[in-house]
Image: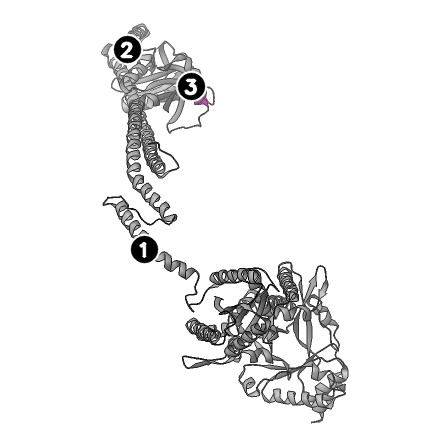
Amino acid sequence: MRLRFNSLEGRIVGLFLVLIVAVQAIGLLVIEHGINVNARSSIATELINGEKVFRKLMEQNAQKQRFSAQVLARDTAFVQAIGNGDEDDRATIASALANSGRRARADMTMLIDGERRVTVGTGIVKNGALEKLVLGLLDRAEQHDGASAMVIVDQRPVQVVVMPVKAPITIAWVVMGFALERQLVLDMRELSQLDVAIFTRQQDGPFTPFESTLAPAAMAGVARALQALPDNQARPFDLDVGGIRYSARLLPLGLEGGRHADVLLARSIDDATAEYTRLQRTLMILTIVATLVACGAAVITAMRIAQPLRHLAGTARRMERGDYDGRIDVERTDEIGALAKAFAGMRESIAKREQEIGRLAYWDALTDLPNRAQFVRLLGEALDQARQREQVVFVLMMDLDRFKHVNDVMGHAFGDALLQKVAERLRALLAGSQPAEHPQPQLARLGGDEFVVLLPASSIDHAHKVAAGILRALEAPLSLDDQTVDIGAGLGMAAFPINGADPESLLSMAEVAMYAAKQRNDGAVAYDAAMDKSSAKSLGLLTELRNAIERDEFRLHVQPKIRLDTGEVVGVESLVRWVHPERGNVFPDEFIPFAEQTGFIRVLTRWVLDQSAALCSELQRQGIYLKISVNLSTRDLLDQDLPAKFREILTRHQLSAGSFCLEITESAIMDDPVRAQQTLERLHTMGVDLSIDDFGTGYSSLAYLKRLPVDELKIDKSFVLNMENDIGDTKIVRSTIDLGHNMGLRVVAEGIESEAVWRLLAALGCDQGQGYFMSRPIAADKLVGWIAGWTPPARAALPYTESVGST
């Protein structure tokens, strides 16, 4: 059986091999690292011990040399000859000194008298630096009964021994010098397995080899390597000698006249790790053998795992073709056996539930009505029959009114029960009102609160009659859980072959008609091609609005609000303008209603709030403190997240809520008083002022308005514009001002277009005003300049001021 590497067997084998190779590779790396660490540690220990051995050898040589000098220094005849001080004894002294030097194999001998003068000398005693060094050792030799030191003589390291001659006081000193011999480095090599090299050098000069166990040809390279080392190199360092790696230490031997003597102790790294290297080779062979064995075991294991899985895969392919028969021949007690048993159980369950799944795929579980997929199939069949018989087919689509509100307020469980009640009512209506000459209509639920009715072989009159019956049935209140619910619906109709020729087109056209019916609130609406154009235009406008936000095409304008008694600028109302790249300035009346209708107004309101907060923050930095008014729509009031969004804007711009006044129309409040009041109370708790805009144009209950947490009433401009000429408008304005003050509210008039209206409002006690007389809406960035140039009417001439002064 061939193993494919993209199969499960191949992947199992590959995984085994990767794991084994990875483990072995990591093990080898760890072993190699351990070998290197251990070898380095062992070599470092050898070098330290080698230094001790070398110094011990040097000390033993010094002791032997001191003994030779001591024998001469204590010779009675030699001492007596020195003590006599006769000229005749001088030859005797020189002969004894020379003979002792030869016996000790000294390279130089010297006798220094009590006056510290060299009286006799043989060998290399003429070296002035040597004589100076020897004289420096006399005191130490006398105190310690002998002394020794390493000196450099003619680029040769020499060990000097000084021994006092006493009778019984010191009358002279015997000095012997021994040049280091090659035997010393050979003995060191024999004792420690370390290579030894002795170098001499001038201060900061090159290293000159003296004796070495290393190959002579490599000494020049070693000297250059030592030259590159930093001064006082105490730690071991690596050295390459003729292609062989060494770990080495450099030991100072002596210093004389600016010259140094150093000994190099080196250990071959390759020799030190030879045993470890053999061990590594053995481990590598074992790794290869283990990998091959593991590969064979992995192949066998993979086949044992994959073979029953292939059998199960074949069974699954048969199930895919709808064949649920056949036996699963996997007799195992491990996890694969458990999988096979579970697979068999799954096959049986699938076979039992396939029919149920097929039913659920085409039926709505909540209402037990056909769903969209089933309705499309039924509609397709009806269209095929209608083509053959040249009949007309109608599709009636309806969407319940206020269902979302009911769902939000009463909960989803209540909403589901309501949909079931609606389905029962529609099913009963269609079953009991169908004439015998017409085929039975088919009711379906498309999803959410949308229902659709198929009327095969119908007529326009019959379709309108059924639609009217459906609307009447839905207008009747529904009782559920001791709650009475008014719903209603918008209903649209489309017909074959008049409007469309396929199921999806008819459904789409009926949906367009349905939305037109909901907008017009005018019963059932039949599809018309003009509706699609309007729908496309609305869709295009919505796209342009979204792009306008992203492309920063909106501009913030403001209209000042003035105190009518003093003329002081106390606030501004924020307004939005759209600078379209092709159409130029688009006024609010052209896009605000559409934004409210589509829900885009929430995005736009948040933009205005954010821009207004930025303006307010900038004004406060310049020392100008104004209250910013922003209009809220009905959809804004129904947004329960509005207070949190507004708080986030205030926090980001570091403003207090008292810097804002939010304006709400009466109609916005009365559309859903409960939710509106909840939103307003949360906003008022934050500290923001609230205003009733366009007061007097709605039909709100004053008792209800009294419960709202508002701070301001704005008189609609329709009553203000003609106050000079219409006594009725003046009375309405006066009553509104008195009403607002009696309720403890601030009263603002909008639409002031003349000084006479200003004075009249001031005389009536109106608190603030805005209008073209003071300023048209201006760009936000020009507000500071406008404030600087604003000049109110003379206060002495204001009727309100005069009336106050006379009381």
Q: Main secondary structure of the magenta part?
A: loop
Q: Which quadrant would residue 262 be assigned to in this image?
A: top left
Pair 3/2: label in front: 3
Residue tagged 2: 104
Residue interval drawn in magenta: 223-235
- Label annotation for residue 349: 1
Q: Residue at x 30, y 35 (%)?
A: 298
Kindly report the distance in space between the C-alpha atoms of the residues bearing marks 3 and 2: 34 Å
Residue 594 on image: x %, y %: 63, 69
The crowd level at tag 1 (other Cα within 10 Å; few <14, some 14-19, many 20+) is few
Residue 686 on image: x %, y %: 52, 74
Amino acid type of disc 2?
Ala
Residue 153 on image: x %, y %: 40, 15
Q: Are marks 3 and 2 in contact (CB under 8 Å)?
A: no
- Label annotation for residue 222: 3
Residue 8 on image: x %, y %: 35, 39
Under tag 2, what secondary structure?
helix
Amino acid type of disc 3?
Val
Q: Is residue 281 left or right of residue 494?
A: left
Question: Could you tell which of marks 3 and 1 lies nearer the N-terminus?
Answer: 3
Residue 751, compared with residue 785, is above or below; it is below
Residue 323, compared with residue 420, is above or below; it is above
Pair 1/2: label in front: 1
Kindly report the distance in space between the C-alpha atoms of the residues bearing marks 3 and 1: 85 Å
Give the position of the C terminus as an image quadrant.
Answer: bottom right
Residue 696, compared with residue 186, is above or below; it is below
